[in-house]
Amino acid sequence: MSLNETWMTRTVKFEENLKCRASIATERSEGSCFFAIGWLQLPWTAFCPPGSSFKELQHSNTARHYTLLQNTTDYRILLMDEDHDRMYVGTKDYIVSLDLHNINREPLLIHWSISQQRRDECVLSGKDQNGECANFICLIEPWNRTHLYVCGSGAYHPVCTYVNRGRKAEDYIFHLEPGKVESGKGKCSYDPKLDSVSSLINGELYAGVYIDFMGTDAAIFRTMGKQTAMRTDQYNSRWLNDPAFVHAQLIPDSGERNDDKLYFFFREKSSDSGSSAIHSRIGRICLNDDGGHCCLVNKWSTFLKARLICSVPGPDGIETHFDELRK
């Protein structure tokens, strides 16, 4: 799903007169605030009236046509870096860094493509009907004060590397670290059409991702770091049933870091027999989960999921389902 189709504003609302277990407000491209291929709303939400239509934004003074690169329609805002005042965008074969204070300033670009040999192997495997045999950037996470951790689909062979962004925004440093390429399996989906989500916490990468070439093995993974590598149970529809991952968010429960929990927002097929309905879910894991010792070895023992429902209290209360979550 590319950002020319949708832009999502993520919210979790708890109001006095509306008991919301969880909600995510989604704005499609015809809605208010958006970053879409060819159009950029500036400055963000400051002049973004609720309910504005796509056409109204086109004719307003707060939206203008904006082109980053030629020959691509796949743009994904992957990281908003307020410390460096940069917005990092992933696209086909490029990592883009934009100045949040002046979006008109020429962006910093890194061209990160795959080898011709890898491209040929991808084509021979039967892919590339829609140009998938390229390196679509799917993950950009802050590694430390000077580096980013970046992953791409690698023409159905996921790869990751490190990007030096400098210590300060004024440095204008932006380049790949040579010789640092590593496997991206479990971090980025093989198929660029299958969205993945991630969160890098204390040197450990948590990701909702499809980890196989055929795009049938979906999992919530923990890789890197000192803790045990973990995942959801494989091919178990009661855990994950053909999910479309939307977002991952760390929500601390208390001042004790060991109690922190990570929440995954996703859509998946209903588990009801014979039903083709799609339900939106929120899944939760504990960061200190080390799995089981006899059963659930290297699998999450704290994984829970629930349907996203917003309920109005009282005998005549109604329930609203948020089954159209989008990235």
Image (cartoon, rainbow, N blue to C red):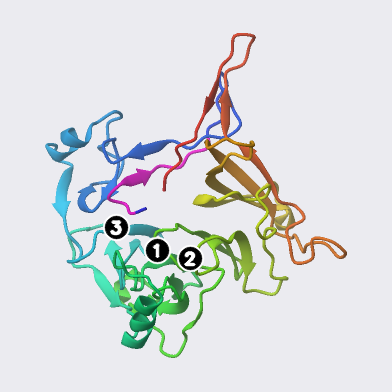
Q: Does 7 appear in magenta? A: yes
Q: Earlier in the sequence, mark 3 or mark 1?
A: 3
Residue hosting label 3: 100
Q: SS for tag 3?
A: loop
Residue 73 at what x, y percent from top left? 24, 59
How far apart in space, not on screen, are marks 3 and 2 (Cα)? 28 Å
- Which amino acid type is shown beneath numbered disc 3? Leu
Identify which residue is drawn at 57% across, 69% down: 186
Residue at position x 45%, y 90% from top?
Answer: 179
Of tags 3 and 2, which is closer to the observer?
2
What residue is drawn where x is 31% and y is 76%?
A: 171
- In this figure, which residue is indicated by the disc labeled 2? 189
Q: Nearer the viewer, residue 289 or 271?
A: 271
User: Is the Cβ of the residue at disc 2 closer than 8 Å to that at disc 1?
Assistant: yes
x then y, percent, for residue 183: 52, 79
Instruction: Give the class, few, some or many, for how many residues have Cα within 10 Å of label 3's Cα (few <14, many ≥20).
Output: some
The total number of labels drawn is 3
Query: Is 99 positioned to the left or the right of 274 in the image?
Result: left
Helix, strand or loop for disc 2:
loop
Magenta-drawn segment: 2-12
Q: Is residue 137 magenta?
A: no
Residue 81 is at least partly visible in this image: no
104 or 140: nearer the eye? 140
Answer yes or no: is residue 179 visible.
yes
Q: Position of residue 75 (x, y in %)?
A: 30, 59
